[in-house]
Structures are given as structure tokens and as C-alpha cells.
Amino acid sequence: MPDDSYATHEVLNQPGDLAGYNAYADDAALAGAAAALGAGDVGGRFADCGALVGSRRVQALASAANRHVPELRTHDRYGNRIDEVEFHPAWHELMGLIRGSEVHSLAWRERRRGAQFDRAVLSYLWNQGENGVCCPASMTFAGIAALRHDPALLARYQERILATGYDPRPLPPAAKPALVVAMAMTEKQGGSDLRQTQTVARPESAAAGPGADYRLTGHKWFFSVPIADLFLTLACTEKGVSCFLAEGWLADGNRNHLLLQRLKEKCGNRSNASAEVEFRGLRAVMLGEEGRGIATILEMAHLTRLECALSSAAIARQAAAQAVHHTAHRRAFQRVLADQPMMQGVLADLALESEALTWLALRVAAALDAGEAGDEAARALSRIGVPVAKYWACKRAPGVVAEALECHGGNGFIEDHPLARLHREAPLNGVWEGAGNVICLDVMRALGREPACRDAVLAELGAARGADPRLDAMAARLAEALARPALPEGEARRWVETMALALTASVLLRHAPTAVAEAYCRARLGGEGGLAYGTLPAGTDTGAIIARLAAQS
Ligand SMILES: Cc1cc2nc3c(=O)[nH]c(=O)nc-3n(C[C@H](O)[C@H](O)[C@H](O)COP(=O)(O)OP(=O)(O)OC[C@H]3O[C@@H](n4cnc5c(N)ncnc54)[C@H](O)[C@@H]3O)c2cc1C
């Protein structure tokens, strides 16, 4: 026992963890969006997932998995090449939990209207828990979109891809009940410009083309989840860059002729492994049309881009919730921080931004859902809305996190705190699945090639016509711009930003409480807010906006 006579101090005024809350039920914005845009929490699935994500258990696992990062094992003790990755047990436990939540599978397993949307809500929730495991969950989910190009391959793997179990054993897919999917496209000379792919594919026999067996030789500079059971990749044939599906291990138990050269030492997403890899005769099957590999794999990327939007909205939400919690339990100058007028302005601004990103991402998820069900207008809205939401959420989330970190004072900058992890995580969504400029070029491409995309955006804005003069004015400017034959590439960011703001305002005005929608329109559309957070216009109902996530604190 320490001698109390030498006690240096009492620990006072430290808020403690935000833990033991329900990330769904205690978030009025999320529950409101789920009810308005989907069918709400049917069967209590969201609340179960929300309780798990908000639990001390997941937080402890997340902390451990990010502190004890994966290690590459190139050889066994006898010198045999094994190319495996060793993870902390927390990673495997988290993988089991996220698979159990069906983030990877719900949308395809429950073939009903609303299943895509519900899966998006689950993904949003898990992105507030631990982002590393969200990467394999997202790619496993999205891989189904590409596999649909080959019904035979889909039939071979689908059931085990969608299984709720998790099996980390390094075995060939045929020997496993549950499979994880990844994708490896990026090479050293170009990640955005995939036409520069150097990896070559040669047919194993005279039978070439879709469904045929090939051997691939080359490298990939970024390959996240290199322990995946299946992965999609790109390689050149005589007809151009084509898409291939490969198994991680062969039937004889050996690695599929791939060498893991190095694991990336990443700034964020540290629990997850990302490798540099060489293919030395990798066995793979051509997936989809020969020479159209980028288009095939981009169908997968469309879904992972939605994941980036959901993830960034979730990261912003978690950061804002942490800030509300901390300031509600911390005093300075004899007063609770959250009661200080300036802090209220900051918290309200963070809550507003995170709520707005949430509605935008989920609105796009609802469009994807309806599009999958055959609604063509919704499909067009999803086609353009996904990159718009991805671009915007990825741009906004890091700023929200930085400001939320500042609300914590020094504690927020220390690795023990989830804010430090969020701070390193937030910029990543802006890079992978296409960095900002590339995403804006994709929006321009959609507008140029598919007039239905422009119509879908304008219809979405028209649905809120008359609700706010600022949105009406912005919609008119957009209608005029989108009527031009083509927008200059140099203006792409400005127009994508305008679309994001207008689409967000439209969904907020139709479905969110007046305090939220009005503050958003005034501050973000009407120019009444400042550039830094904490500069909402005078008269904003900050209490009502903060209360939308204060139940968690
Ligand atoms: C942690 C992590 C994990 C990853 N995991 C994977 C993975 O599993 N599989 C995989 O395939 N890849 C993965 N990547 C790679 C990622 O997808 C690429 O880094 C990304 O697509 C950008 O490619 P690049 O790095 O080659 O950058 P570049 O293509 O060189 O782009 C650099 C910059 O130039 C901009 N730019 C490009 N073209 C234009 C243009 N025409 N006009 C204006 N600006 C332009 C881009 O927006 C970007 O800002 C991962 C990356 C990270 C950081």
C-alpha cells in the first residue's frame, strides 16, 4: 500500500471514457435518418450493433488491435516461404464480431428492398468502433458486385463469402466455411491511372478469355488484407487491362505464388495489414470481359466508395460525440465546459456537420438500395451521389476530427484516447478508392456520359423546392451549370462541392428537424457561417443541435 502521507494529488476533473452507450439508440440523428430513409430499426438489429460498438469491450479491442500492429512472417523457422501475417488476438476477435454483425453480407443475403440501406447503417455503426476491420468487411461486401460478372464463380464462393462466421486459418478457400475478399489494383507507377498496369497475365491453356485460367506476373504496391482468401486484381492481356480473381492459397496448402515483400507502416488504419506484393505466376481466373478490367473492378469500387462516405461520416460523428462527452464532464474556470457559450457554438457546429454528412451518406445509400431494386432514377442518383458524397465526407471529416480533438485539450492528442486514432484515420478515406481529384473527375464523367445523373440530381433538389430560398438559388445555379455541354475540369471541385451542399440541404429540409436544416442552410449555403468551426450564425438553436447526440454522453 502506498503511504498516503506522500500522496501528491487527487485525480479530479477527468471525464472518463465514453463507453457503455448505444451508438444507434443514443444518436437521434442516425435513428431519424434510418426511419426517414429506410424502414428504421426492424428487429432491433441496429440497436444491438450500436450497443456492441459503444461497449467497453469493443473499445478495448480496438485500442489493443491498433497498438499491437500486424507483423509480416515471410518464412517459417525452417526457412520455408510462408508469406503470412501475424495479428494480435484483438484483431481476430474484432473480425469475428464485425462478421457477426453482417456488415459484409446483409445486403446480399437478405434479398429484399431495404437490405442495402440496412447494411449501410451497420457499416456506419462499425466505423465508429474500429476502422481497421471495416476494410475487409467493405471489400468482402463489395466483391459480390464484381463477382456478379461470372455466375459460376459467384455460385462457387457466394455462400461462404456471405457466411457470418470468421475463419482466419491460412487454408485454400475450398477448406474454409467463411471467406474474406480483398482487391489489389495499385502499382508503383500509378494508382489513379490503372491503365498503366504493368502486371501481365498469360492463359494457362488455349482456352482464354472470361472464366479461363491465367498465370499473373507483376507486383502490387498496395494490397490491404493480404491474408484474404480471395482477391480481385488487374493484369494486362493482349486486349488490355483485365480483371482477375485469385485465391490466396492453393489446393496443396501453399501460397498462391505471391510474395508479401513488406507491410506498410501506415499513419492510420494500423490494426489492418496493407502489403507490397509480387505475383510470380499467380494462378487466377479472368473475371468479366477481357480488356474491360477497370470497368469490372470499378463496380466493386462504386460500393467501396460509398463505404468511404459512410466511414467518414461515422468518424466525424464519433469525434463529435467524444467532444460532447468530454466537455460535458470537464470543468474549467469553475464551470462545465459544455455550458460555455463559445464551446456550445463549437459543439453545435461539429454536431451539425457530422449530422449533415450522415444524412448525405445515408441518402445515397438509400438511392443505391432502390437502384439495386430496379429503380432507374435512383440508380442514376446513386451513380453520381456516391462519388459526390465520398468526395465531400472525406474532405469534411478530418476538419471535424481536428476540432473535436482540440475540445479535449491535451488528452485528445494522446494515443490512449480514441481521438488520436480518429485523427490518423480520418484522412485515409480521402485517398483510397480514388483521391479527391479523381473522384471529382468521376463525377464529371458520370455527368458527361449519363444525362440521367444530371436529371437525378436536379430532381432530388426539386423535391425540396420552396423549403429554403438559399437552396432554391443554389439549385438554379446548378441547373444552369449542368445544362452546359461540359464543365471545365478546373471547376470540377467547385461544382462537386456545390452538389454535395445542395443534396445535403435537400435531404435535411425534407426530413431533419427545423433547427438542423435551417442552421445548415444559413451557415453552409447562405454564407452566414464562418470558415472555422464554432462560427454558426447568431440565433442558431445550438442546444437542439447538440442534443441530437448528447444522449451518448
Ligand atoms: C492505407 C492504404 C491502403 C490501400 N489499400 C489498397 C488496396 O487494398 N488495394 C489497392 O489497389 N490500392 C490500395 N491503396 C492505394 C490507393 O487506392 C491509392 O493510393 C490511390 O488510389 C491513389 O493512387 P496513387 O497513390 O498511385 O496516387 P496518384 O495516382 O499518383 O495520385 C496522386 C494525386 O494526384 C491526383 N490526380 C491523379 N490524377 C489526376 C488528374 N488527372 N487531375 C488532377 N489530379 C489528379 C490524385 O487525386 C491524388 O491526389 C491503399 C492506399 C493506402 C494509403
Image (cartoon, rainbow, N blue to C red):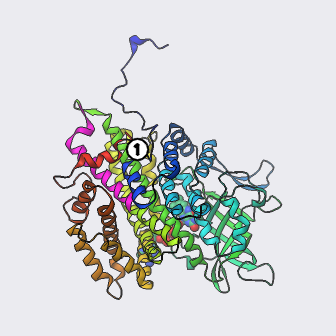
Left or right placement of residue 109 versus residue 250 in this view: left
Verify whether residue 353 appears in magenta: yes
- Which of the image's four quarters has the C terminus? top left
Whether residue 394 is visible, yes or no, is no
Q: Is residue 4 visible?
A: yes
Q: Position of residue 60 (x, y in %)?
A: 53, 38
| Dominant SS in magenta | helix
**Residue 347 on the magenta segment:** yes
Q: Residue at x 24, y 48 (%)?
A: 542
Task: Kindly state the secondary structure of the residue where label 1 is placed.
Answer: loop
Q: Position of residue 56 (x, y in %)?
A: 50, 37
The residue indicated by pointer 1 is 26
Q: Residue furthest bottom?
A: 485
Relative to 519, is 22 above or below? above
Viewer-proximal residue among 357 and 209? 357
Q: Provide residue 53's location: percent of width, then percent of height.
A: 50, 45
Q: Say above or below: 152 vs 87.
A: below
Q: Quadrant of residue 26?
A: top left
Report how many numbered discs are placed on residues in the image: 1
- Give the camera-side residue of 323 and 41: 41
Which quadrant would residue 240 be assigned to in this image?
Answer: bottom right
Given the current orientation, which residue lies at the most extreme right position? 252
Q: What x and y, as percent, mark residue 522? A: 21, 61
With respect to residue 329, does 376 lie above or below? below
Residue at image position (23%, 70%) is: 466
Figure check: 344 above or below 486 = above
What's the magenta region?
Answer: 335-359
Amino acid type, label 1: Asp
Foreground of the two, 104 or 63: 104
Closer to us: 68 or 538: 538
